[in-house]
Image (spheres, grey):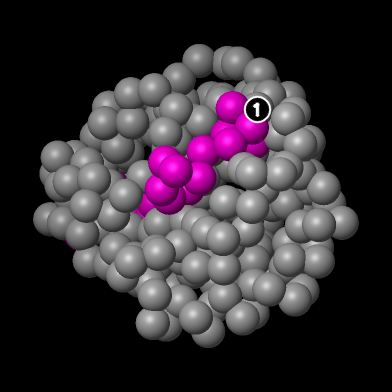
């Protein structure tokens, strides 16, 4: 990875309004860590999740390619690097990547590099957008190369030398909301902070209840937790 500007920073700011959703993800990260005291945030962005994970007791190192976003992480007191090259192999007990892998053209190589940084027995949490049918102006704005299906991401993780422990879809109502955005949303792909906050307050709690029955078949996002043998 080399320094480059990220085109979706304003959408990251809008997503900061999704307080319930963000808390769900931060809690998911901590639970997936399996008691590890340290975590690597691959694609840390503005630091929203790195800060929440740190507040929950983990020491966080951030990898962020965008120099402006990396400067913001530095200002928050995180150890940072522009790429995995600066992270020693076999040194990371737990790593997570939240809505990042879809931005990387060679996702296979990225996962292999992440797997190589894990200690034996270390875990990786990958969280990505799901279902290519939902691809919209928002995906184009922020530079998504793809969305994922469960079988494909599990296969990718296995090719990286990791053993999947959990693989499921998340946010079933978000699947429908994303389809509506694709049909009637704006052409520039901008997210409205007001709409994000409304969905987060009203729909996301209901979506999490529905996920209990739908996590194997439907969701706006997909998560995989895997372990290095």
144 relative to 2, above or below: below
Which residue is painted at 75% across and 28% down in the image? 188
Query: Where residue 113 sits in the image (x, y, percent)?
Result: 29, 32
Q: In which quadrant of the rendered view does residue 46 lie? A: top right
Q: Is residue 221 visible?
A: yes
Which residue is painted at 17% across and 46% down in the image? 155
Query: Where residue 16 sits in the image (x, y, percent)?
Result: 76, 54
Which residue is painted at 87% across and 56% down in the image? 194
120 relative to 53, above or below: above
Farthest residue in the right direction?
A: 194
User: Residue 116 in magenta?
Assistant: no
Residue labelled with disc 1: 141
User: Residue 133 in magenta?
Assistant: yes
Query: Where residue 196 sits in the image (x, y, percent)?
Result: 76, 57
Q: Is residue 141 left or right of residue 16?
A: left
Q: Quadrant of the N terminus?
A: top left
Q: Is residue 44 left or right of residue 160?
A: right
Considering the numbered disc 1 on the image, is that residue within a helix, a strand or a loop? Answer: helix
């Amino acid at each position: 990875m080399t320094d480059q500007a990220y085109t979706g920073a304003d959408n990251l700011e809008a997503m900061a309004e999704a307080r319930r959703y963000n808390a769900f993800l931060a809690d998911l990260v901590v639970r997936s860590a399996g008691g590890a005291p340290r975590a690597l945030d691959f694609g840390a962005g503005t630091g929203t999740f790195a800060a929440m994970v740190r507040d929950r007791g983990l020491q966080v190192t951030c990898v962020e390619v965008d120099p402006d976003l990396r400067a913001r992480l530095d200002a928050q007191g995180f150890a940072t690097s522009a790429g995995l090259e600066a992270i020693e192999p076999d040194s990371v007990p737990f790593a997570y990547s939240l809505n990042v892998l879809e931005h990387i053209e060679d996702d296979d190589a990225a996962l292999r590099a992440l797997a190589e940084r894990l200690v034996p027995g270390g875990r990786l949490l990958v969280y990505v957008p799901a279902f290519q049918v939902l691809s919209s102006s928002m995906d184009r704005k922020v530079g998504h190369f793809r969305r994922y299906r469960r079988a494909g991401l599990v296969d990718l993780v296995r090719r990286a030398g990791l053993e999947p422990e959990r693989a499921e879809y998340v946010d079933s109502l978000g699947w429908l909301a994303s389809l509506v955005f694709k049909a009637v949303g704006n052409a520039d792909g901008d997210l409205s902070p007001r709409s994000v906050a409304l969905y987060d307050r009203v729909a996301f709690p209901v979506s999490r209840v529905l996920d209990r029955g739908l996590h194997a078949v439907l969701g706006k996002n997909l998560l995989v937790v895997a372990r290095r043998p």
